[in-house]
Image (tube, helix red, strand yellow):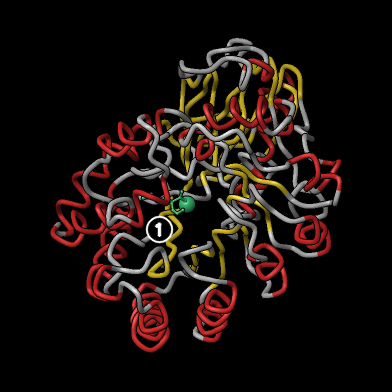
Amino acid sequence: MSENVDLLIHSAGQLCVVPAHDGGPQRGAALGDLGLIANGAIAARDGRVIAIGQSEDLRARFRAESEIDAGGRCVLPGFVDPHTHLPWVGDRAGEFEQRLAGATYMEIMNAGGGIMSTVRNTRQASVDKLVADNLPRLARMLRHGTTSAEAKTGYGLDTATEIKQLDAIAALAAIQPIELAATFLPAHAVPEEYRGDTEGYVGLIIEEMLPAGAAWMREQGNPMFCDVFCEDGVFDLDQTRRILTAAAALGYRLKVHADEFVGLGGTKLAVELGATSADHLVMTPEADISALGRGDTVAVGLPGTPFGLAHTEYTPAKAILAAGGALALATDLNPGTTWCESMQMVIALACRYMGLTQAQAIAAATLNAAFAIGRGHEVGSLMPGYQADILILDVADYRQVGYRYGTNLVQTVIKRGAVV
Ligand code: NIG
Ligand code: FE
C-alpha cells in the first residue's frame, strides 16, 4: 500500500539535505555538511518534507499528486537571505559614480547623501509605492532561489515612516511567496533633524520609536528583530547597548550591524546580549571573534558589501570557524553599498574572498542563514519536518554553485511544496 503525498521529486543526482547539528546550526569546522544523497528523492505533504531517501525506495512508498523527475540534477533547500534592507524607494547610481571618482561611503553619508538620500525618497512614498517598487526585487530574489528573507526598516528614521516601512513589509509578505522576517532599524543613521544631536535621536528611539514598533509587532502577532548600525560616526557602543537593551525589554529579538568599517565591540556586545545575529563583521577584533565561539549569536558575512564598495577586506570566516562560531551568508541588499539580489552571487564571493568551500557556503546560505533569523527549525534544511522549500538546479553537481557566477543556476523554485 502506498501512502499519498502532494509532491515527490525523484532522480536527483545529488539531494543536499543540509542537516541541522544537534538541532542547531553547523558550527565551526562542522560547517559544510550537506548530507548528500545520490539518486535522491524527497516527498512533501501539506507544505512539509515528510521523507527523504533513495529514489527507488520513495517511489515505491509514495503515490504523489505531482511528481517531478529531477533528471539527475542537484536539489537543495531554498536559500535564506537573513540580511536585506528592503523596502526602499529610489536608487543611488550617482553616488556609485562619485565613489568611482574617489569619494568614500562615509564621506558621502556625512555630506547628507548616502542613507539620508534614500530616507528622503522613502519618506515621500506611500505604502502602495513601497510595495510596487519592491515587489520586482523580491521576484528576482525568488528566481535566484531565495525562499525566505529578512527585511529591515531604517529608511524612515521618524516614527511614522518607520511604521510605514513595517506596513510595506507586511503587505509584501502577503502577496508573494518569499517569507519575510521583519527587523526594526530606526537606529540606521541619525536623521537630518537631529544632525549633531545623536543623543537626542537615541532618546527618541528609546522613548517613542521602539514602543511604537513593539505595538505594531503585538498587533501582527509575529516576532520582530531590532537592529542598530553600531559604527564610528553613527551609533557608538554605549548607544547601541542602550537601544538594544530597551528593545529586548519590549520583546524584540536582537541583531547588530557590527564592524563594517571600524571594530567597536559590537559583535561582543551582540553575544553578551544574546542577539540572534551579528552582521557584517569585517573589522572584527580577535576578542569578538572568540566570543562568537562561546555564544549562540550567528555571524552573518555579507561579502557583497565590500565587493560593492570595492574594498579589499572581507569577513574573516576562517577565524570565525576556527573559534567555533556559526557562520551564515546574506546579500545586505540595499541601494547604497550593494544592490545584489542573488544569494548565488554571494556564495561565489564568499568562496573567493572569505575562503569558504562551496559546501560551506551552501550550508551558510541555507541552514545557518535560517538560524540567523530564528527560523532554523522550520526552513534552510530538507530534513523531514522542515518546510518543503526546495530548489532544483540546472546542474548535476553542487560544486557548480559558487564556481560559476553571473548566470542563474536555479531551474525550479518550490515554496511550501508548490512550484512558484
Ligand atoms: O548594511 N551599513 C549600513 N547600512 C547598509 C547600507 C545602507 C545604505 O547605504 O543605504 C549596509 O551596508
Ligand atoms: Fe546592512
19 relative position to 304: left or right = right
Q: Which residue is located at x 65 percent, y 55 percent?
A: 377
Give the residue at x 44% y 63%.
Answer: 183
How many tags in the picture?
1
Residue 224 versus residue 101: which sits nearer the camera? 101
Task: Quickly name the residue at label 1.
Answer: 152
The answer to whether the beta carbon of the residue marked 1 is less than 8 Å from any atom of ligand 2 is yes
Q: Could one spot residue 291 in this view of the protein?
A: yes
Query: Looking at the rendering, which quadrant does residue 301 occupy?
Result: top right
Query: Quick check: 184 left or right of 279?
Result: left
Q: Residue 299: x and y, percent?
A: 67, 52
Task: Kindly identify the amino acid type of the residue bearing the numbered disc 1.
Answer: Lys
Q: Nearer the viewer, residue 189 or 80?
A: 189
Q: Secondary structure at mark 1?
A: strand
Q: Is residue 218 visible?
A: no
Quadrant into which the N terminus falls:
top right
182 sits to left or right of 236: left
Query: Which quarter of the rendering shows the C terminus?
Result: top left
Task: Name the side, left or right, on which 50 lies relative to 195.
Answer: right
Q: Position of residue 122 (x, y in %)?
A: 21, 57
